[in-house]
Image (cartoon, rainbow, N blue to C red):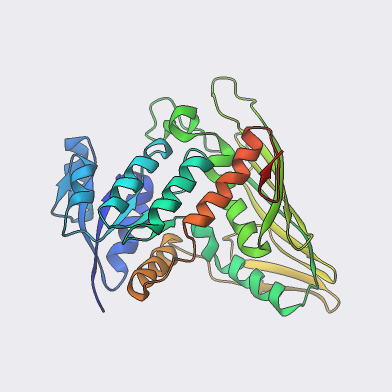
């Protein structure tokens, strides 16, 4: 198996807990360098990840001929510049979600990937959750009939303090938005994965925590080409953690009350049953594994740049209070 030498830009929580361990455990992967602008934290990161080469300037990492693929795990505002530079140097790029600050940035990166020797993927890792993959199988089997609607509800209690390293997620200039950009985007991608081509979207968002400049609650409605519809709700704050996904068909319903919780419920003509599924200890692992396979097989990754743009186009419809129908802004 050909070894893929990776460079990692950013060394936050996601890299330490998931991306780094995934790259270390996958056959045919090697971490050849890490970039972080703080020299002391860079040294600590390299030591913990057992990586010999550190780069204070990410530009030096993406120019390095010894690196073939780059994982970008930085605040959203930096994604576009970093992705474009890496693609310009022929690197394969796997970028944290969401891909860009808006659909315009995403389209620019998507276009650049089509004219680069490298490919571009987005880290929507819930695409590979066992429950999501099993739902897709059940829908394809016809067991619940034709799909009528889908809804996903996500609620997170995490609110970073003023001195927390991830405080930037509450800063619009850094994150582009709030709950919808941070974790609602994951649920939008899952609905696109399960339901197919979107034709219209609109939504609303609001802010209860007045010391933040981003929304803490948002709801988006999506129309699909099949005629089915979907709703995603994303809320940050409060005391309730939820991660619910439900698909209703003409003959039944399939539902999970915790998307990575290990089981799902199917109700239909044949009664109700529960299925037990494995939980992912490291949900980034199958995402990175597919991206590596895509490099070796010279194909697009499952979660590609176009998917990143499609998700962002829906989010933009909410933030700009403008729906789109069949691709045209209203």
233 left or right of 168 in image: right
In the image, residue 172 sits, relative to residue 128, either above or below, namely above
In the image, residue 120 sits, relative to residue 59, either above or below, namely below
Residue, x 60% and y 58% (percent of image)?
190
166 left or right of 223 in image: left
Task: Tell which of 9 and 271 is nearer to you.
Answer: 9
Q: Position of residue 250 (x, y in %)?
A: 85, 68
Q: Is residue 45 visible to the viewer in this orientation of the structure?
A: yes
* Number of marks: 0
- Residue 218: quarter of image: top right
- Give the quarter of the figure containing the C terminus: top right
Residue, x 51% and y 39% (percent of image)?
102
Residue, x 26% and y 72% (percent of image)?
28
Q: Is residue 98 visible to the viewer in this orientation of the structure?
A: no
Q: Position of residue 151 (x, y in %)?
A: 72, 53
Q: Position of residue 213 (x, y in %)?
A: 54, 24
Task: Tell which of 183 and 85 is nearer to you.
Answer: 85
């Amino acid at each position: 198996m050909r070894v893929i030498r990776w460079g990692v830009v950013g060394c936050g929580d996601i890299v330490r807990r998931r991306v780094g361990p995934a790259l270390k455990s996958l056959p045919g992967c090697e971490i050849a360098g890490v970039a972080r602008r703080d020299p002391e934290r860079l040294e600590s990161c390299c030591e913990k990840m057992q990586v010999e080469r550190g780069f204070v300037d990410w530009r030096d990492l993406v120019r390095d001929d010894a690196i073939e693929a780059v994982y970008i795990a930085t605040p959203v505002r930096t994604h576009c510049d970093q992705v474009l530079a890496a693609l310009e140097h022929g690197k394969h790029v796997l970028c944290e979600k969401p891909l860009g600050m808006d659909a315009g940035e995403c389209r620019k990166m998507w276009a650049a990937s089509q004219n680069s020797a490298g490919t571009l993927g987005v880290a929507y890792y819930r695409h590979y959750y066992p429950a999501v993959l099993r739902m897709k199988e059940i829908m394809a089997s016809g067991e619940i009939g034709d799909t009528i609607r889908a809804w996903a509800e996500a609620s997170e209690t995490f609110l970073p303090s003023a001195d927390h390293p991830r405080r930037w997620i509450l800063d619009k200039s850094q994150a582009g938005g709030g709950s919808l950009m941070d974790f609602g985007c994951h649920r939008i991608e899952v609905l696109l994965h399960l339901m197919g081509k979107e034709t219209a979207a609109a939504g609303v968002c609001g802010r209860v925590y007045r010391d933040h400049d981003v929304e803490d609650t948002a709801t988006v409605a999506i129309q699909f080409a099949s005629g089915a519809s979907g709703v995603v709700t994303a809320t940050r704050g409060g005391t309730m953690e939820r991660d619910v996904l439900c698909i209703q068909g003409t003959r039944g319903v399939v539902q999970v009350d915790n998307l990575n919780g290990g089981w799902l419920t199917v109700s239909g003509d044949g009664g109700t049953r529960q299925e037990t599924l494995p939980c992912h200890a490291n949900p980034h692992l199958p995402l990175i594994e597919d991206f590596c396979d895509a490099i070796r097989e010279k194909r697009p990754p499952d979660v590609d740049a176009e998917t990143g743009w499609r998700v962002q186009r829906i989010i933009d419809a909410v933030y700009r209070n403008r729906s789109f129908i069949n691709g045209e802004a209203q």
